[in-house]
Amino acid sequence: MNAFQELAETTWFLPLVILLAVWDGVWKLISMWRAARNNHKGWFICLAVFNTLGILPILYLTSFKNKN
């Protein structure tokens, strides 16, 4: 395989990694902020430690919705 073919096959990888990092970062920040405001220390620590591509933060946010 020549260098051009390798480059053509991997050009999608970097944008995908950047997109997933932004996706995870946004959800993580929102859920950590809400966990801190609700004094959920255990959730805050779990959200800070585990990287789940936004799955754990989304579960937290849907589980602890405001009841306004």
Image (spheres, grey):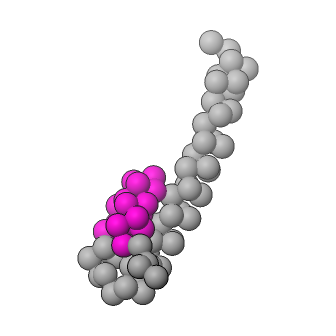
Q: Please provide percent x and percent y for residue 33.
A: 47, 79
Quarter of the image where one finds residue 54: bottom left
Q: In this view, does 16 lie above or below 10?
A: below
Quarter of the image where one finds residue 14: top right
Q: In this view, does 16 lie above or below 36?
A: above
Residue 24 appears in the rendering: yes
Which residues lie in the magenta part? 46-64
Residue 62 falls within the magenta-colored stretch: yes
Q: How many labels does the image show?
A: 0
What residue is shown at x 51% (from left), y 71% (from top)? Answer: 29
What residue is shown at x 37% (from left), y 60% (from top)? Answer: 59
Is residue 57 or residue 46 the one in the foreground? 57
Quadrant into which the N terminus falls: top right
The single residue placed furthest to the front in the displayed view is 68
Q: Please provide percent x and percent y for residue 50.
A: 35, 61
Q: Is residue 53 above or below residue 34?
A: above
What residue is shown at x 41% (from left), y 54% (from top)? Answer: 55
Is residue 56 or residue 45 the one in the foreground? 56
Q: Please provide percent x and percent y for residue 18.
A: 62, 50
Is residue 8 or residue 48 the one in the foreground? 48
Instruction: Report the magenta stretch's main SS.
Output: helix
Q: Please provide percent x and percent y for residue 46.
A: 31, 68
Left or right? Give the position of 58 relative to 44: right
Left or right? Give the position of 12 relative to 61: right
